[in-house]
Structures are given as C-alpha cells and as structure tokens.
Image (cartoon, rainbow, N blue to C red):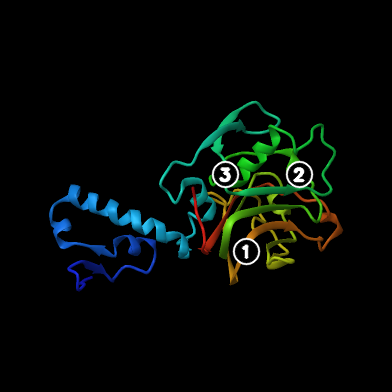
Amino acid sequence: MSTPTEDGHVRLSSIADDILRKTLTFLTPADCTRGPAAASKAMRVVASTANRQRYVDSYVLRGNKHGVVHALATAFGTRQWPTRTVKRSVIRDAVIGVAVPPAGLGITIHREGLMELRFDPETEPYASFSKSAIVDQNVARKISGVGECTLGAGSFVQYELPFQLQVTAFRLGFSTCGAERFLDWAFEAFDGEEWRRLLHSRTSPWPGGFYLGGDGAVVFQLWYPFASTRFRIRLLEPALSMHAHRCMHIRGLELYGTILPPWRID
C-alpha cells in the first residue's frame, strides 16, 4: 500500500519500519513510471541518504538461518562469504574449503583439562583451523580436531561483536566426535561486569550421536532477550564424575536477535 505526501512523493506505509522502509520511503511517481533504469538511478540517490541514517537504527535479524555471524561475513548478504582451505582433519591430509571468520568478529577459545598433545592448539595453522570450523555454517562437513577433545569444566568458545546484539536465539552444531557427551553446558552473555547465564543444559542435544538427519544443527530460543557484545558456550561442572572430560567440537555457532545502534559493517 502507498500514500502520497504533500510534496508529491509516495510514502510506502505497508513495509515494516526497518532499513528497507527507510530506503524506499520517498519515491516520485514519475521516477517509477520511467522504467527500471530511471527508478534505479533515483533509488541510488535515496539510498545514499538512507545509508547515513541506517547506523542509528536497530536492525532485526529475521529467521533462524542467517544471523549476526553471516551478516558480518557477507555485509548483510551483499558479498560472498570468503573461504579458505584447511585440512579436513588434523590427522589426515585431505583438505576442504571452509568459511573465513568475519574480520569484525572476535573469537576466543579457552581450553581447560586438555589432554596432552604433541602441538600447541594456539599456534598456526591449528588456531585458524579451529576458528574456521566454529563459524562454518555447513555443519555437515566432516571437520574434527583433537584440540577440542577431552576438555574440562571452564572451557569455552566466545564471540565478541563490534556492536551490541539483543540476542533472542542461537544455533549450535557439533562435529562427529563425542556429540553425545556434550553435557552440562551453558550459553552466557557478559553484562559489563559479570557473565549472565541465559541457558543451561544438563543433556546433549545429540544424545544418539551426531547424525540425526539434515545438517545436525539445533536452534535454541531464549526465555528473554539480552543485550551484550560478548557471548560464549561454556562447559560447567558435570553432574557425574565420569563426564569430567568432554569433547567440545562446536560448529556453526550463530546468534540471532536485534543489532542495536550505533553499528557499522565495513
């Protein structure tokens, strides 16, 4: 539905109050009737003004497929997500192309109780391997690394965003190793002074193992939205001593909600 304004422009009132509506708010009927080329030229002029305004508004990430990590990596779907080549496994030589972590996304991996390894998981190329595996949204890929095996309570994977996100849900995938033992874990957000627990699970989302059909990822809805720049998945103290060490092969960790102003994605 559209309604004319006093200056002869057309206000599009049926579109939700978001960035798209801001871009399309004012169009002259003449520009619309001159054909695609003229309309496109007029839109570029309007968009140049709207783009200056977009950073002072909130931006809602709709659906449960593309969230804030995808937005950072692709500039809201306007460019291809860069990829790089990593080994399918740290043990085997086969390589695959996986997603490059977005430049604006800080990823911290903290390991407690790590089994004795012949390498330091914080050094390259393993550090890049593990971070690519975490953000790669095709969790059906068979990627595994021993640096995420037999971890203890206090181990975590953290995301730090360049803006505040009022998170309402998150998606989590897991690799083939030890998914049924991914027990006693929490999703947490930092409130500026301390970590707040937004979700706690005593059980694994994959009790029968990883392969449950589809891509194996699970979306978790939160009870209430919470705004922060830092979010993490953390292993808690296990209910049973036999679960003191668990695997944490997190794959495709994605966050959903509303990006709060001021924000930019360059």
Which is closer to the viewer, label 2 or label 1?
Answer: 1
Question: To which residue does mark 3 refer?
Answer: 103
Residue at coordinates 29% horizontally, 61% vertically from top-left?
24
Give the secondary structure at mark 3. loop
Residue at coordinates 39% horizontally, 61% vertically from top-left?
19
Q: Is any atom of residue 60 visible in this view? A: no
Residue at coordinates 54% horizontally, 51% vertically from top-left?
69
Upstream in sequence: badge 1 or badge 3? 3
Which amino acid, by three-letter code, is at mark 2?
Cys
266 or 20: nearer the viewer: 266
Disc 1 residue crowd, few under 14, some 14–19, many 20+, Cα 10 Å:
some
Question: To which residue does mark 2 refer?
Answer: 149
Q: Position of residue 231 (x, y in %)?
A: 65, 59
Give the secondary structure at mark 1. strand
Q: Quadrant of the N terminus?
A: bottom left
Indicate left or right for 17 with 31 as reference: right
Q: Alpha-carbon distance for marks 1 and 3?
A: 19 Å
Q: Position of residue 203 (x, y in %)?
A: 71, 62
Q: Alpha-carbon distance for marks 2 and 3?
A: 27 Å
Q: Is residue 121 above or below residue 254?
A: above
Tell me the number on the disc at residue 176: none
Which amino acid, by three-letter code, is at mark 1?
Ser
Question: To which residue does mark 1 refer?
Answer: 228
Give the secondary structure at mark 2. loop
Q: Is residue 103 above or below residue 227?
A: above
Q: Alpha-carbon distance for marks 2 and 1?
A: 29 Å
